[in-house]
Image: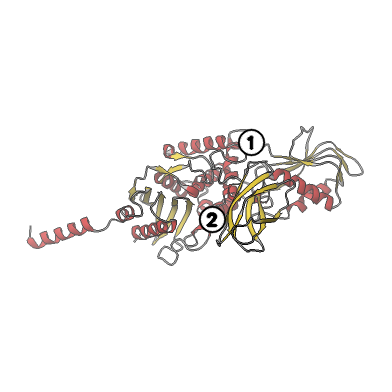
Amino acid sequence: MNPKYLLTALSFLTLTLFAGNPVDDFVDNNLLENANVSLLVKDLQSGQTLYQYRSQNSITPASTMKLVTTATALELLGSDFRFETKLEIDGTVTNEGVLNGNLYIRGGGDPTLGSEKLGDTNFLIQWVNAVKKAGINKINGQIIADASLFDDEGVNPFWTWEDIGNYYAAGVYGISYLDNTCKVYFRTGKAGTTAEILRTVPEIPGLTFDNHLLSSNITFDSCYFYGAPHANVRRIFGEIPANRSEFVVKADIPNPGLLLAQDFSKALTDHQVAVIGTATDIVTKSKNPRLIYSHFSPPLSDIITETNVKSNNIYAEHIFRYLALTVYPVASTVGALKVIKSFWKSKGLPVDQLFQYDGCGLSPMDAVSARFFVELLTYMKTKSANQHAFFNSLPVSGEGGTLASFLRNTALQGKVHAKSGTITRVKSYAGYIELKGKTYVFALLVNNANGTSRAVTNKMEKLLLEVTK
């Protein structure tokens, strides 16, 4: 060989051997040297794997688990699906407009009733008008909230006690109301003193607090509520900023179905429909119930957009639990898990790399591989009739939702549509990159890094910028 060409070849080989591989640079450093990492980047059009590292390893995904829940829901229910809540009556209605019987709220698992995120916060007026339209001006019976479409488990058994009782881990029921969230207003004094509870919004009859919350020299909310579903006692621990005339912390609503029945009864009374009986969630068997009104949620496409863009746990859990009803008579966690795994197995995905215990990713038991995410994302982009609804439900880098600061002011701002996941010692992203006429599918999951969540995010941003150059 010509010495000149030999020298050129050797120089190229040397540069190739010593040039930094983006994946090597990503994992071979003090930040991630002890971390559990699973990553995969593929070219969607060619199907070629561009970069991978332990892509078949299943690790904790946090909220990227919502991709599994929302994709499955779109495939099994359709983007136009709407949750239905029914108003039914039994007994008889006299010529004078007296219902000698009960009025039932038949829950349909709708997470948007009175929600601040979606739907109509004044929906109870529509319900009152429906009762009047049915010729009823007096109810000689009870207002009964029937949440039996879902099991009575409430919270997922694989969540931690630290989370249960807080708004982001609110219970999931056949009837949900006001995002199953109440706001607790506190007044704080000097550091070290107990914060004073001022009020809750909404007011919840019978709810009491065992308050151990301290005023502290901090500037953020470090308050935690503890309590079981349907239990009207919440213990409060932690700290909130000192010397505040008002400071708001959000907790769960212990029994949203009962609260809805109580509020509906009051709304009827306020609008000249007398209610003689009590509001209750104790369901009595009705004879010949008659439907007088159906309340429908916004379409599923809107609900999953809220779920993915804002990482809404309560929406995700309702969607997740509802999936059980495609096979089983009652919505449950166990049923939902079976339905999801069976569906993706039928599509050829590696479900042996999917260890799912909830719908939102809050459970520390959850584990998923980068490969499973990439194959799910590939399926939704290339084979699903709901590909546009799914793609449009994802937040966009540097523009909004949970990706508002991700890759902002970089070449990938506005180019990444993905779901993020963050809990203690977990950072993950999975989604699509659309750049220069090409589409990449990727999943990056990191557990137990030797640094902050922000430091891991910076590393992930650098990697994505490098692999898409």
Q: Secondary structure at mark 1?
A: loop
The residue that label 1 is drawn on is 151
The residue that label 2 is drawn on is 309
| Numbered tag placed on residue 259 in the rendering | none
Residue at 76 percent of width and 49 percent of height: 263
Q: Outermost residue, right direction?
A: 96
Distance from Cα at disc 2 to Cα at disc 1: 28 Å
Residue toward you, 247 or 358: 247
Residue toward you, 112 or 327: 112
Colour scheme in use: secondary structure
Q: Outermost residue, bottom direction?
A: 409
Q: Is residue 117 visible?
A: no
Q: Is residue 227 visible?
A: yes
Q: Amino acid at mark 2?
A: Val
Is residue 222 found left or right of 2 in the rendered image? right
Q: Quadrant of the C terminus?
A: bottom left
Q: Quadrant of the N terminus?
A: bottom left
Image spot of residue 449 (x, y percent): 39, 51
Q: Residues within 10 Å of mark 2 (few under 14, many from 20)?
A: many
Residue toward you, 258 or 201: 201
Residue at 18 percent of width and 57 percent of height: 13
Whichever of labels 2 and 1 marks the residue nearer the N terminus, that label is 1
Image spot of residue 410 (x, y percent): 41, 66
Residue 245 versus residue 331 in the image, above or below: below
Residue 285 versus residue 211 in the image, above or below: above
Residue toward you, 371 or 79: 371
Q: Amino acid at mark 1?
A: Asp
Quarter of the view holding residue 462 = bottom left
